[in-house]
């Protein structure tokens, strides 16, 4: 099995992008925040992303967002207001989204400010923790359910962006 990092390094060399692509490796929180805040664009090309912590972290750091229209990222990003959305699995749309943000730096900065404001308003960890505690407390007050039914589970798409690596 090929390690993802090794495969990405090989692909970077194969397309001769070594001068423009640098793999940072594992970063601590301050290092990640610094890198995201310096990014021209944070690209999240997920085919399946239930919540989108990566999007929230990038927005909190002030990075302009280009995200695939799936799950949490698509719920967070309002196209043209807090970032740019593209169809998952569509490289041409991904390229258009990134190009849009790189060509209009003022619009990208405006969208990044809007996205950061949403994070500060709705995704502060203390507030999220308090809301979660409220849900658990309400469930505890109600007690166990006697009417248990099977939950329908949404199918997870096959593979992901790197699913072809073996």
Image: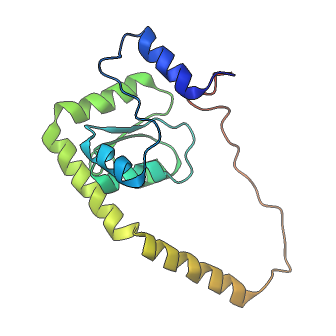
In this view, which residue lies farthest toward the bottom? 141
Position of 9 relative to 62 (above/below) = above
Tally the marks.
0
Q: Is residue 101 left or right of residue 139?
A: left
Q: Quick check: 77 left or right of 153?
A: left
Observer-nearest of 75 and 29: 29
Q: Residue at image x 63%, y 27%?
A: 163
Quadrant of the snapshot with the N terminus? top right
Frontmost residue, 155 versus 56: 56
Which quadrant would residue 20 be assigned to in this image? top left
What residue is drawn where x is 33% and y is 57%? 60
Which residue is at the far left? 106
Question: Residue 69: x, y in percent?
Answer: 46, 41
Could you tell me which quadrant the C terminus lies in? top right
How far across and down, in percent of the image, does residue 87 sit?
Answer: 45, 34
Compare residues 131 and 126 and report the one nearer the observer. Answer: 126
What x and y, as percent, mark residue 95? Answer: 34, 25
The spot of residue 41 in percent (x, y) is 29, 38
Q: Residue at the spot x=57%, y=80% of the render?
A: 133
Which color scheme did the rendering employ for the protein? rainbow
Q: Is residue 12 above or below residue 157?
A: above
Residue nearest the viewer, comparing 92 with 46: 46
* Residue 94 image-quadrant placement: top left
Say which quarter of the image contains residue 152: bottom right
Q: Is residue 90 visible?
A: yes
Is 163 situated left or right of 112 in this image?
right
Q: Is 5 left or right of 64, judged from the image as shown?
A: right
Is residue 77 in view from this perspective? no
State whether residue 44 is above or below residue 4. below
């Amino acid at each position: 099995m090929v390690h993802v990092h090794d495969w990405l390094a090989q692909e970077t060399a194969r397309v001769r992008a070594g001068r423009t692509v640098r793999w940072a490796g594992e970063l601590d929180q301050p290092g990640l925040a610094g890198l995201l805040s310096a990014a021209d664009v944070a690209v999240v090309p997920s085919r399946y992303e239930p919540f989108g912590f990566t999007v929230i972290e990038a927005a909190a750091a002030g990075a302009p967002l280009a995200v695939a229209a799936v799950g949490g990222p698509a719920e967070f990003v309002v196209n043209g207001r807090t970032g740019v959305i593209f169809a998952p699995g569509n490289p041409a749309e991904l390229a258009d989204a990134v190009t849009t943000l790189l060509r209009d730096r003022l619009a990208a900065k405006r969208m990044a400010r809007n996205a950061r404001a949403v994070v500060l308003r709705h995704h502060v960890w203390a507030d999220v923790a308090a809301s979660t505690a409220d849900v658990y407390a309400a469930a505890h007050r109600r007690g166990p359910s006697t009417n248990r039914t099977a939950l329908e589970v949404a199918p997870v798409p096959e593979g992901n962006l790197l699913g072809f690596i073996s």
